[in-house]
Image (cartoon, rainbow, N blue to C red):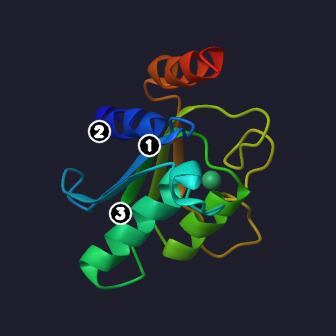
Amino acid sequence: MRLALDEAALAVRGGDVPVGAVVLAADGTTVLGAGHNEREAGGDPTAHAEVLALRRAAARTGRWRLTGCTLVVTLEPCTMCAGALVQSRVDRVVYGARDDKAGAAGSLWDVVRDRRLNHRPEVIEGVLATDCARLLTEFFRSR
Ligand SMILES: [Zn+2]
């Protein structure tokens, strides 16, 4: 999560909301991909931290299926990212702050653990939640 927080901090330079994500290999320590929000920086509505980290991990491994991997993200994934996480077949999603307004991993929806889907990653929430939320609060306060 510390690595995801470092990524999140990079988003601010491009004027983006500070959210960061990393994809860890099955060994739990090798970083296969990292990303931060680049919607503003890249003019891309789908450039969320999770999507970018998943794409980079897939590019690095040469396969779209990220079975065994863990995605760590500072903010609860939205519906798009929750969908991408299911599609990528990651084993686990770890997130920091909850997103009561748009979260799709337990708050507003629970797309990643929907029993109707045949792939449901494990979800661990609240890791360094205060640090993750503080980054966002400071960003929005400064605007
Ligand atoms: Zn998202």
Mark 3–mark 1 CB contact (< 8 Å): no
Q: Which residue is mark 3?
A: 69
Left or right for 26, reference 13: left
Earlier in the chain: of badge 3 and badge 2, it is 2
The image shows residue 39 at horizontal and vertical percentages of 58, 53
Farthest-out residue, bottom: 63
Q: Secondary structure at mark 1?
A: strand
Left or right: 100 in relation to 51: right
- Count residues near mark 1 (Cα–Cα under 10 Å), then give few for <14, some for 14-19, many for 20+: many
Looking at the rendered structure, the kind of residue marked 2 is Leu
| Circle 1 residue | 20
Q: Split into 4 quadrants, where in the image is the C terminus? A: top right
Q: Quadrant of residue 59?
A: bottom left
Residue occupying the point 49% across, 72% down = 89
Coordinates of residue 136 in the picture (x, y in percent)? 57, 25
Spatial CA distance of label 3 from label 2 is 16 Å
Q: Is residue 73 above or below residue 126?
A: below
Residue under pointer 2: 3
* Disc 2 element: helix
Of the numbered discs 1 and 2, the one sitting upstream in the chain is 2
Q: Which is more foreground, mark 3 or mark 2? A: 2
